[in-house]
Image (tube, rainbow, N blue to C red):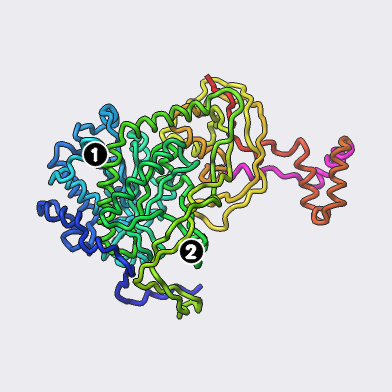
């Protein structure tokens, strides 16, 4: 096989948007922040007029300096990366509440802002550094701490951040050099929230489940089409979050945030994808619904979660400006809504536990969905384009211009449920399935090991027709499709079996991990693949007299076998299919093959 040719040398050619909002030219909030800052607290971003971003070590040093200079901040180490770098969060609290217990006693909402999960998308880190300086050092925004406790993470993927290169993020307009999207082991952390393979994610989960912040924000920079928007937003608001919390996000938080950002001159819109890439009039779909992503994972904990996507084609300065203003306004809104928000989260946790433990028939509970077909009128703020024939592909390629255009279309925000299952009272996992249990422990789930054997009547699944992906995804060969049939079982489970009760705050995380049809379940991620493997086999000469005896003793089985022979030509022509049909119906066949080993307990175990 011939080796790949060496890359041809050329200068970096960052793309640029044809349109930037008029207010971006001034970026007043950034200019004022820089003007007020002591020289020792400037970011490399500011020192280079937004051409560069600082290294991880530089950023951590700056945050340490701010924490040392202010009595209201503490930099906390939360774990290490695969390459041994220390991960940090900075806790800012006017009450000096630097632990989860003390923070929650203040009654103030805890807001967690995350940066650098994709280190090429790094303008959020620079904006957060400036905002922390304006809270802790210049005190321009010190009032934020009157009503919130702020927890911020400079860079989640620190190893990827340090792979600096001008050749990363081909679709992004600066900074001059930036980090790499994946970790040192080539995992995308923003696909890892449920399966938790990366050490960085295990550290993050320990921190998150200890603090249980009331609001989460994840700063990104999006790829995609050129458009007028300097920032687009997404929040779980439908079946993928508790209804009252989703309603608050949709009806209170987002409208206020849009209003304030637009008043500053930002062009803000929903984070959405066109249904037809070549015809935007057919509408746009909103919503990343799989819990492997940050904001949808946090929604499983009944917390509002804001995905912030500034625009990759805008300048790094414009991206930083959008992040900065958005965080200032979001924190003000959350502070004003703090008591209400905390009550909504508390009530959601309580009501979820009640759902799982109530008596009587249980309604199906949402697991997965797709964008629905009912939309609302929407004006998409795009940028004019023309099409030319590509020299590379010979196909039409879009060439963006600089004229803004408004396109009447439809926005689809509702979810259509594709998988829903009644909640059990709990789950029973055989002790042998250690990797599945370890993931639950990483999520801070309450687990109880049975001290003695118990006999329970519950439910499980028989899975059939499994289809695996052709290629690995995030280091695993995913099970993409299968058929489920729920069955009743009575089993005697030995001491050491793990019982996972659903009357706990992590109930929805448990449900999504242990229900096979969940889009990020342990079954989907391949942790139960061995259940589909047949381990014992019968020699044909040994099984022949047994099969004849089966047919002779069971007229119903004989009739079914003969009907298949007469009606299914492929079956009749396949010696293996004919053999397997009878072998699977014999007492010699493995009873646990294709049977999910986890039991759904319909009543709580005391």
Q: Earlier in the sequence, mark 1 or mark 2?
A: 1
- Left or right side of 366 for 70: left
**Does 4 sit above or below residue 32?**
below
What residue appears at the point 20 percent right and 54 percent down from the top-left corner?
29
Locate residue 45: give its quadrant: bottom left
What residue appears at the point 36 percent right and 67 percent down from the top-left corner?
404
- Left or right side of 201 for 154: left
What residue appears at the point 41 percent right and 37 percent down from the top-left corner?
245
| Number of residues whose C-alpha sits closer than 10 Å to that of mark 2, classed few (under 14), some (14–19) or many (20 or more) | some
Label total for image: 2
SS at mark 1 in the image = strand
For marks 1 and 2, give the one nearer the viewer: 2
- Which residue is under mark 2? 280
Indicate whether residue 546 is drawn in magenta: yes
| Number of residues whose C-alpha sits closer than 10 Å to that of mark 1, classed few (under 14), some (14–19) or many (20 or more) | many
Per the rendered image, the range of residues in magenta is 528-552
Residue 202 in sight here: no
Residue 412 in sight here: yes
What residue appears at the point 44 percent right and 73 percent down from the top-left corner?
398
Where residue 7 appears, x then y in whole percent? Answer: 37, 74
SS at mark 2 in the image = helix
Name the foreground residue: 596 vs 225: 225
Locate residue 536: give its quadrant: top right
Name the foreground residue: 354 vs 527: 354
- Left or right side of 315 for 188: right
Where residue 490 appears, x then y in whole percent? Answer: 66, 26
How far apart in space, not on screen, are marks 1 and 2 (Cα)? 43 Å
- Which residue is under mark 1? 91
Name the foreground residue: 332 vs 312: 332
Indicate whether residue 463 is drawn in magenta: no
Name the foreground residue: 394 vs 413: 413
**Main SS class of the magenta portion in the image:** helix
């Amino acid at each position: 096989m011939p080796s790949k040719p060496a890359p041809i040398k050329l200068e970096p050619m960052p793309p640029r948007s044809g349109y930037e909002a008029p207010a971006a030219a001034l970026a007043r909030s950034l200019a004022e922040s820089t003007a007020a800052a002591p020289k020792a607290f400037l970011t490399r971003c500011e020192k280079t007029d937004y051409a560069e971003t600082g290294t991880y070590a530089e950023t951590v040093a700056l945050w340490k300096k701010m924490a040392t200079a202010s009595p209201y901040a503490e930099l906390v180490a939360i774990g290490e990366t695969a390459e041994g770098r220390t991960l940090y969060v900075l806790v800012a609290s006017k009450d000096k509440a630097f632990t989860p217990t003390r923070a929650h006693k203040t009654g103030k909402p805890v807001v967690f802002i995350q940066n650098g999960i994709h280190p090429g998308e790094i303008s959020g880190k620079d904006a957060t550094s400036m905002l922390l300086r304006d809270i802790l050092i210049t005190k321009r925004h010190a009032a934020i701490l009157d009503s919130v406790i702020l927890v911020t993470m400079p860079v989640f993927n620190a190893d990827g951040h340090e792979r600096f290169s001008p050749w990363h993020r081909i679709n992004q307009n600066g900074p001059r050099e930036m980090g790499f999207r994946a970790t040192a082991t080539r995992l995308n952390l923003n696909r890892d929230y449920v399966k938790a393979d990366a050490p960085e994610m295990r550290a993050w989960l320990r921190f998150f489940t200890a603090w249980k912040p009331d609001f989460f924000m994840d700063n990104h920079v999006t790829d995609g089409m050129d458009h007028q928007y300097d920032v687009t937003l997404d929040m779980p608001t439908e079946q993928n979050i508790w209804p009252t919390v989703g309603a608050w996000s949709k009806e209170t938080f987002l409208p206020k945030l849009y209003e304030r950002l637009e008043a500053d001159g930002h062009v803000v819109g929903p984070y959405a994808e066109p249904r037809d890439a070549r015809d935007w009039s057919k509408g746009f779909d909103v919503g990343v619904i799989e819990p492997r992503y940050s904001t949808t994972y946090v929604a499983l904990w009944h917390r509002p979660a804001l995905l912030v996507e500034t625009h990759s084609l805008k300048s790094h300065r414009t991206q930083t400006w959008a992040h900065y203003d958005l965080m200032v306004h979001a924190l003000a809104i959350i502070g004003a809504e703090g008591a209400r928000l905390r009550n909504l989260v508390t009530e959601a946790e309580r009501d979820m536990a009640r759902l799982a433990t109530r008596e009587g028939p249980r309604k199906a509970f949402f697991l997965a969905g797709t964008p629905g077909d009912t939309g609302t009128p929407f004006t998409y703020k795009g940028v004019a384009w023309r099409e030319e024939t590509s020299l590379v592909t010979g196909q039409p390629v879009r060439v963006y211009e600089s004229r803004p255009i408004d396109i009447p279309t439809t926005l689809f925000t509702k979810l259509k449920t594709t998988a829903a299952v009644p909640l059990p009272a709990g789950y029973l996992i055989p002790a042998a399935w250690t990797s599945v249990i370890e993931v639950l422990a990483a999520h801070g789930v309450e687990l109880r090991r049975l001290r003695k054997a118990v006999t329970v009547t519950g439910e499980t699944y028989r899975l059939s027709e499994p289809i695996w992906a052709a290629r690995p995804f995030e280091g695993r060969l995913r099970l993409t499709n299968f058929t489920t049939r729920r069955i009743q079982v009575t089993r005697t489970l030995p001491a050491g079996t793990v019982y996972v009760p659903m009357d706990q705050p992590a109930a929805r995380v448990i449900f999504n991990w242990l229900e096979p049809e969940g889009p990020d379940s342990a079954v989907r991620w391949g942790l139960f693949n061995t259940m589909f493997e047949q381990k014992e086999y019968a020699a044909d000469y040994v099984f022949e007299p047994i099969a004849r005896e089966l047919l002779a003793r069971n007229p119903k089985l004989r009739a079914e076998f003969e009907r298949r022979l007469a009606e299914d030509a492929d079956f009749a022509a396949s010696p293996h299919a004919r053999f397997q049909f009878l072998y699977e119906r014999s007492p010699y066949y493995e009873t646990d093959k294709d049977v999910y080993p986890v039991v759904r307990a319909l009543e709580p175990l005391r």
